[in-house]
Amino acid sequence: MGVSGTATPLCHVVLYAPEKAGNVGNVARTCAVLGAELHLIRPYGFHLQDREFERAVMDYLAGVKLSEHASWTAFQETLKPGARVWAFSTHAQQLYTDVSFARGDYLLFGPESRGLPVWLREALPKLKLPQPGGGRSLNLAVAAGAAAFEVQRQVGGAGPTS
């Protein structure tokens, strides 16, 4: 599904057990625009043929390299040695703007209703997006987009053209 290529993508956006079709569709659109790869780790709370997913992704899916993984372990088996996976969590102390991203980094986000499980948060470096106005958390698509655009800001690159 989506495009293939050998160039290193801007980044990899990884959604662990996503629950909302619309959010995933919106993240896919962001990935298409930035030249990022999208990884979905099962279980999902929807089907990729869901109307809400199709409505959100519109005609951008053809421009996304999408990989589906049966489990966290299956996803890990696809990582090359030295791959950097950043876990985004409201439990993190370090701001996402305080690290230096590299082209090809993995940005990991948990399910909308509960975030990443503790065992994943403890296993990986954690980053957070600021929420100066309060609230529990940002919408998944907004958080993934903000993080991916920060990678674009730091590493640059033209990405796909319109």
Image: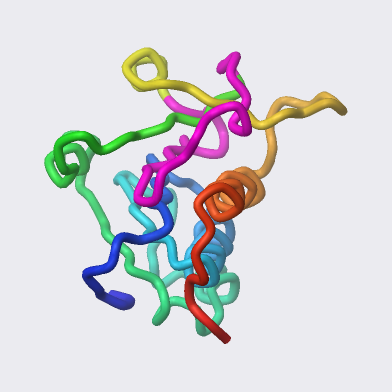
- Residue 85 occupies which quadrant of the picture? top left
**Residue 35 percent coordinates (x, y):** 44, 67
**Is 121 located above or below residue 75 in the figure?**
above
Q: Which of 150 and 51 lies nearest the eye of the viewer?
A: 150
Q: Residue at x 22, y 69 (%)?
A: 6
Question: Within the magenta stretch, is there residue 109?
Answer: yes
Q: Residue at x 28, y 67 (%)?
A: 7
Res 46 seen here: yes
Is 139 situated left or right of 63 in this image?
right
Q: Residue at x 31, y 77 (%)?
A: 3
Q: Which of 83 and 29 lies nearest the eye of the viewer?
A: 83
Is 130 situated left or right of 159 in this image?
right
**Is 27 located above or below residue 56 in the figure?**
above
Dominant SS type (magenta): loop
Q: Which of 23 and 78 lies nearest the eye of the viewer?
A: 78
For the image shown, how many numbered marks are present on the structure? 0
Question: Within the magenta stretch, is there residue 19?
Answer: no
Q: Residue at x 42, y 38 (%)?
A: 108
**Residue 10 percent coordinates (x, y):** 42, 58
Quarter in which the C terminus is drawn: bottom right
**Is 104 located above or below residue 82 in the figure?**
below
**Is 157 located above or below residue 5 in the figure?**
above
Quarter in which the N terminus is drawn: bottom left
Q: Which residues are magenta?
A: 91-116
Res 140 seen here: no
- The way the protein has been coloured in the rendering is rainbow
**Residue 66 percent coordinates (x, y):** 32, 64
**Residue 77 percent coordinates (x, y):** 12, 40
